[in-house]
């Protein structure tokens, strides 16, 4: 209704509705839009919503369904699409196993609409009973406005920053970083040169630079859990990336996701687990390597996650 009334994109209409709900279900009117008749209808719809009856995860899932429609309606670019719940839950599960703190700062340098960030926040607060301050960065102001709606309606403590994620960061250091990394080249070659993962010639891979920026922002011993291309370590720039990891972090895990989730092998993704050196961090005796079984096979997935739990107990929290 608002999209039609305001003659705007689906995402902007979503943000408007979210802001109305945050403001106590008040319909805001500018230049006589929406019309008095639409305001009456919207107010009646808003009054049917009682978010206090719902837990954070139910609210997140509802908002995600609404935002999934945006992918189709607004023809959203692949790098701006939601991290699928299947993958978000796996990343949240891994975070819950390796991060054992009562309070933590959680950072997502490519926060988008905040779906992955709040998935991890919900999982950690439920399973580990931890108090979390969330921090998100994005250079797209519409995405950040949507993330503000998603975080606020779940009553999460989230601070959002509108900037290039590779510019200097002004938020506190993080204990945990998660990101669904965009894949491609970073266009600002001179800016990229300040990073150790920059390409020797030509454009640098933005996902390499973001890995370095995220680890730089972690406290000693902090963890980073990243969704990456499966081919990350076979690219022409892989050696520089490996050299940087060996200097700054412990590569603790690399888990391929089931190929059935992706259109083709070139699109396949994996989860990379890095722990920043320092503090009590040490290299695991055995790096966690493997590929998740088909998510359609519940028994195989349970068996695989049980093996991960054993690895954590033996290598990380022994």
Image (cartoon, helix red, strand yellow):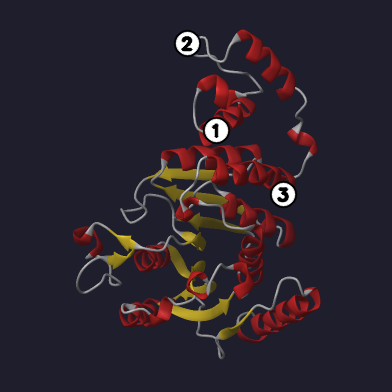
Q: Is residue 34 shown above or below 245?
A: above
Q: Kindly indicate whether the residue at mark 3 contacts the one at mark 2 (C-beta within 8 angstroms).
A: no
Occupied quadrant, residue 214 = bottom left
The residue mark sitting in front, 1 or 3, is 1
Occupied quadrant, residue 234 = bottom left
Q: Is residue 285 visible?
A: yes
Q: Which residue is mark 1?
A: 15
Tell me the number on the disc at residue 57: 3
Q: Position of residue 52 (x, y in %)?
A: 76, 35
Q: CA distance from mark 2 to mark 1?
A: 18 Å
Pick whichever of labels 2 and 3 is earlier in the sequence. 2
Q: Position of residue 213 (x, y in %)?
A: 37, 63
Image position of 48 (left or right of 121): right
Pick whichever of labels 2 and 1 is earlier in the sequence. 1
Mark 1 crowd level (few <14, some 14–19, many ≥20, 10 Å Cα): many
Q: Is residue 280 shown above or below 172?
A: below
Going 34% across and 50% down the picture, which residue do you hit? 164
Going 45% across and 65% down the picture, which residue do you hit? 219
Q: Which residue is mark 2?
A: 31
Q: CA distance from mark 2 to mark 3?
A: 36 Å
Count the marks: how many? 3
């Amino acid at each position: 209704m608002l999209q039609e009334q305001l003659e705007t994109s689906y995402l902007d209409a979503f943000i408007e509705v979210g802001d109305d709900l945050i403001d106590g279900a008040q319909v805001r009117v500018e230049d006589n839009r929406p019309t008095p008749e639409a305001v009456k209808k919207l107010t009646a719809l808003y009054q049917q919503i009682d978010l206090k009856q719902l837990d954070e995860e139910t609210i997140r899932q509802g908002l995600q369904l609404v935002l999934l429609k945006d992918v189709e309606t607004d023809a959203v670019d692949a790098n701006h699409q939601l991290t699928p719940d299947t993958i978000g839950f796996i990343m949240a599960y891994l975070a819950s196993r390796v991060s054992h703190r009562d309070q933590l700062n959680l950072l997502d340098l490519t926060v988008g609409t905040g779906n992955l960030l709040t998935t991890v926040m919900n999982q950690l607060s439920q399973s580990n009973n931890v108090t979390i301050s969330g921090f998100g960065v994005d250079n797209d102001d519409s995405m950040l406005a949507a993330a503000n709606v998603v975080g606020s309606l779940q009553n999460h403590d989230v601070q959002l920053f509108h900037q290039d994620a590779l510019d200097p960061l002004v938020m506190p250091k993080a204990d945990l970083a998660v990101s669904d990394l965009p894949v491609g080249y970073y266009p600002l070659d001179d800016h990229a040169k300040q990073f150790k993962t920059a390409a020797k010639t030509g454009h640098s891979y933005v996902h390499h630079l973001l890995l370095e920026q995220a680890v730089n922002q972690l406290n000693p011993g902090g963890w980073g859990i990243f969704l990456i291309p499966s081919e990350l370590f076979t690219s022409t720039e892989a050696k520089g990336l490996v050299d940087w990891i060996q200097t700054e972090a412990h590569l603790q895990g690399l888990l391929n996701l089931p190929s059935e989730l992706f259109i083709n092998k070139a699109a396949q993704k994996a989860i990379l687990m890095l722990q920043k050196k320092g503090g009590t961090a040490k290299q695991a005796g055995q790096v966690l390597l493997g590929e998740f079984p088909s998510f359609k096979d519940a028994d195989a997935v349970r068996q695989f996650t049980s093996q991960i739990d054993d690895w954590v107990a033996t290598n990380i929290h022994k």
